[in-house]
Amino acid sequence: MNFGLGLCMQQVAGDDLTVRFKEIVEQVRLAREVGFGSISASQHYLSAPDQYIQPIPTLSRLVDETEGMALVLGVVVLPLQHPLSLAEDVATLDVMSGGRVIMGVALGYRDEENEAFNLDPRKRVSRFEESLEIVKRLWKGEPVTFEGQHFQMKDVQISCRPAQRPRPRIALGASIDKGIRRAARLGDSWICAPHATLDTVKSQQAFYYECLDELGKPRPRGANLARECYVAPSYKEALTRGHRYIAGKYKSYHEWGQDDAMPDDETFVLEAEELAKDRFVVGDPIAVRDEIQRYKEELGLTSMGFRVQWPGMDNREVLRTIRLLGEEVLPHVQ
């Protein structure tokens, strides 16, 4: 069982980001020390009043702190990017890390971002698919000519190829059936929404496998799932403090419209304990072991990612959760 650390890119207004970034570096160093196998960094723009650190510069800074760990862009809002710029930036990161990058991409869902980038949301899917095709072709290192609805190129050849051959793995994030089918068709793997309930994950995983079968593509040997996680020495403390932090983050998600992009029966407008049920991994080390074991058995997990910090949270609590996961949970779910 491999554990991954999801970095907290969103920070509250007024926080000193230079201090917060130093804390992220400290968290990553500890995660590597206690046995985590990957780190991931997500992307959003325009998170006011909160602040948001961008993922590619962040992962570039952390290359030397993460020897042996995968670096996951989880996820890039692909329709907002130019594929040539993205291909070169991610290729450079892959070279810097010696071939440890996994690129996660998704459609995005926020009106503020689409409006600021002058993107018609009705054209997100076609722009997404064109971008993905161009990035894949550019990474081959040969001149690319492309005539599409959104992008036109003639004999364009990138100046930096990824270290991995033929290219880094590409994972597609999706929360509804159309997106999951697209992930099966275009991606190397699928990223399930980290806030979907266990029943939703099981149903969507089964549908993803059906899509792979229809396409004649092999099913993965194992599965990965990301979860919000808070571990404390006592179960009571974990519930009291963990739910408070997580509820604040999901209030932001609801305001951004994230649950509108989920299946119809999913909502974030719930009391903290109800919201956490079958969504989050919160408790003392023994309770967390049991919960992870349940996910492992029901979904066939071989790796699991955890976001252990939310805006405004004290770094000491973050480090405690990372250490408890690495020392008191991971050895028991191998």
Image (tube, rainbow, N blue to C red):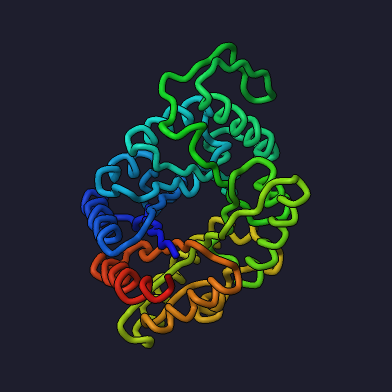
When the figure is inspected, residue 269 is found, relative to residue 223, above or below; the finding is: below
**Relative horizontal placement of residue 325, taking residue 145 as reference (left or right):** left
Residue at the image position 22 percent from the left and 52 percent from the top:
22
The answer to whether any part of residue 189 appears in the image is yes
The quarter of the image holding the N terminus is: bottom left
- Who is closer to the viewer here, 193 or 268? 193
The quarter of the image holding the C terminus is: bottom left
Residue at the image position 55 percent from the left and 46 percent from the top:
171
- Who is closer to the viewer here, 174 or 157? 157
When the figure is inspected, residue 5 is found, relative to residue 231, above or below; the finding is: above
Task: Give the farthest residue toward the right.
Answer: 214
Within the image, what quadrant is residue 323 found in? Answer: bottom left
Measured as percent of width and height from the top left, residue 332 is found at: 39, 76
Within the image, what quadrant is residue 129 found in? Answer: top right
**Relative horizontal placement of residue 160, taking residue 276 as reference (left or right):** left
When the figure is inspected, residue 140 is found, relative to residue 64, above or below; the finding is: above
- Total numbered circles: 0
When the figure is inspected, residue 302 is found, relative to residue 68, above or below; the finding is: below
Residue at the image position 54 percent from the left and 77 percent from the top:
294
**Relative horizontal placement of residue 56, taking residue 184 as reference (left or right):** left
Measured as percent of width and height from the top left, residue 156 is found at: 53, 15
The answer to whether any part of residue 111 appears in the image is no
Residue at the image position 67 percent from the left and 18 percent from the top:
147
Measured as percent of width and height from the top left, residue 46 is found at: 45, 45
Measured as percent of width and height from the top left, residue 182 is found at: 69, 45
- Who is closer to the viewer here, 312 or 321? 321
